[in-house]
Image (cartoon, helix red, strand yellow):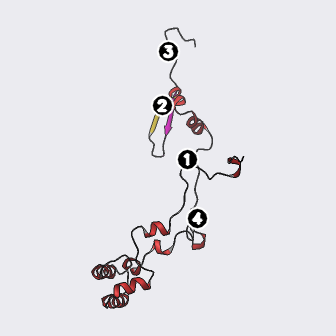
Amino acid sequence: MKKESGEKEPIKKIKIKNKKGLTVSYDEDNFNEYFPHLITEIAGKKKSVKIDSIKKINNPKQFPYNDKIPKELLKPGAIDFIRRCSTKEEALNILGYLLKRNEITEKNYNNLRFEILKENGLQKVINEHGGFKKPGHYENKFRVYRPLKGELKKASNHDIDFE
């Protein structure tokens, strides 16, 4: 059948249907213009990838970050919090809070409380367990060096002119 000069060519449509039955149609020329790679994926034979399972890591040694993150950062204990205290009241409040949340036993609570309430007890407890933790303690102790984008490299021998 011949097309007359005034008759327009029919627009080619692309219909995309999802699993629920919703169909969306697009003009093929516009679709190709906006999404050139997507049209080849849709028209291709292989349209999806099936994932059968996810591997669980049962052995903690297989976990890649296990050695890099110290236990002190992952789960701080009562002593870690007490080492930041400057007064007995602060230390006792922290102990009470940890006891209320069941993060320490009543026996440990009583032992630490008894030690702190002695004369210079807080200072003794802090000094016995590594000293006072100043602000920025973890940042300074566990800092990881990561070069920034655009950071200058150290000059190597071939970069230096000797006369």
Badge 1 crowding class, 10 Å Cα cut-off, few under 14, some 14 to 19, many 20 or more, is: few
Label 4 to label 1: alpha-carbon separation: 37 Å
Q: Residue at x 60, y 70 (%)?
A: 62
Residue wearing tag 4: 55
Q: Secondary structure at mark 3?
A: loop
Name the quadrant containing residue 61: bottom right
Label 4 to label 3: alpha-carbon separation: 57 Å
Task: Judge whether residue 59 can be spotted in this image.
Answer: no
Residue wearing tag 3: 8
- Circles 3 and 2, Cβ within 8 Å, touching? The answer is no
Label 3 to label 2: alpha-carbon separation: 18 Å
The first of marks 3 and 2 along the sequence is: 3
The first of marks 4 and 3 along the sequence is: 3
Q: Is residue 56 left or right of residue 119?
A: right
Q: Nearer the viewer, mark 3 or mark 2?
A: 2
The first of marks 3 and 1 along the sequence is: 3
Task: Judge whether residue 91 can be spotted in this image.
Answer: yes
Q: Nearer the viewer, mark 4 or mark 2?
A: 4
Residue wearing tag 1: 150
Expressed as whole percent of the image width and height from the top left, the position of residue 53 reads: 57, 61
Which amino acid, mark 1?
Gly
Expressed as whole percent of the image width and height from the top left, the position of residue 54 reads: 56, 62
Which amino acid, mark 4?
Lys
Depicted 48 relative to depicted 29: above or below: below
Q: Which residues are drawn in magenta? A: 12-20
Q: Is residue 38 left or right of residue 120?
A: right
The foreground one among 69 and 117 is 117
Name the quadrant containing residue 89: bottom left
- Circles 3 and 1, Cβ within 8 Å, touching? The answer is no
Which amino acid, mark 3?
Lys
Q: Nearer the viewer, mark 4 or mark 3?
A: 4
